[in-house]
Amino acid sequence: TEHGFVSLVPWPDDRLLTIWLDGRNMTGDGHGQGDMTLRSAVLDASGTVTQRHRVDGRTCECCATSAVRVGDEALLAYRDRSNSEVRDISVTRFDGEQWSDPTRLHTDDWNIEGCPVNGPALASEGEAVVAAWFTAAGGTPRVKAALSTDGGRHFTDPVVVAEGNTQGRVDAVLLDDGTAVVSWLGTRGDRGQVQVRAVRADRGLSPVSTLAALPSASRHVGFPKLAQSGNHLYGVWVGRDNPSHPSEVQMARMRLDDGPTR
C-alpha cells in the first residue's frame, strides 16, 4: 500500500495528531485502481496509537496535506477527488473526538483525471488562518489564497496571487499583524523562481517579490518551503549549482520590509 504526505499537529498531553494519505484500498501497480483515503490517528509519547479515523474515503492520490492547530481544534486542508474527477481543495476540522464533514474551500471545479501533485498550504496565528492553493481550472494556472478570522470556519472569497507563469507548489506564513505571505514556484522561460506576495484583508495584494532565482522549475526542485523569523523570510528548496553535483537543500533570505510588506 501507499502511505505518505503526512501532516503533524502538536496535541495535548505530549501527543501528536497525525494525518496521512493511505492507499490500503488501492490495488495493482500505479494509481487509478481503488481509492486513496485520508486517515488520522493520535500518537502519544510511548508510541501508542489511538483515535484512528478515516477522514475521507476518496482523495487525490499524491497531493500533500496541510494541517494547523486553531484553539482546541485542528484544521486540515487537502486535495479532494469527486466521482467526476473534480479535484478541488477541501477542509475539515478535528475537535479531539471526531472530524467534521469535509467542505470545499472554494468551487474552482478543476476537472483533471490525473493527480497534479500540488497540495494546499495552511498557516495560522491564533484564530487567524490563511489557506493557499494551486488550480488550473479552465486551463489557466493560478495560485489563490483566502483568509479566515474565526479559525477556518469561514473564509473570504479567494484572491488570485499568481496567474499564468506558475507551477504552484505553494506555502504560506502568517505574520503577527495578520498579514499573510504566500510563496509559489514561478517560471521565467526555462528557469524557476521562488516568488512571494503579501495578502492583506484591508489592503489587498502587495507587489510580487522574487525570493530566489533557480536554474529550473522541474520537479527536482521539490516543494519550496517558507518560514518567518523576526523581520526575515526564509525559503528553502532542493537544488544544485552544477548538474554534475548531488542535490542539496538550498536557502534564501529576504527582509520583510524589502519584499512583500514594503
Image: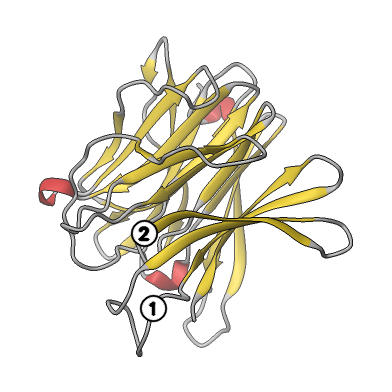
Residue 200: x %, y % from top left: 44, 18
Residue 215 visible in rendering: no
Name which residue lies at 61% across and 25% down.
175
Name which residue lies at 38% across and 28% down.
146
> Foreground residue, 139 or 237?
139
Displayed quadrant of residue 113: bottom left
Left of 74 or right of it: where is 243? left
Name which residue lies at 37% across and 34% down.
208
Mark 1: few/some/many CA within 10 Å (<14, 14-19, 20+) = some
The three-letter code of the residue at mark 1 reads Met
User: Which residue position holds label 2?
Assistant: 59
> Foreground residue, 16 or 124?
16
* Element at label 1: loop
User: Which residue position holds label 1?
Assistant: 26
Q: In the figure, 192 relative to 204: above or below?
A: below
Marks 2 and 1: in contact by CB < 8 Å? no
Disc 1 from disc 2: Cα separation: 12 Å
Q: Earlier in the sequence, mark 1 or mark 2?
A: 1
Residue 8: x %, y % from top left: 66, 52
Left of 142 or right of it: where is 93? right
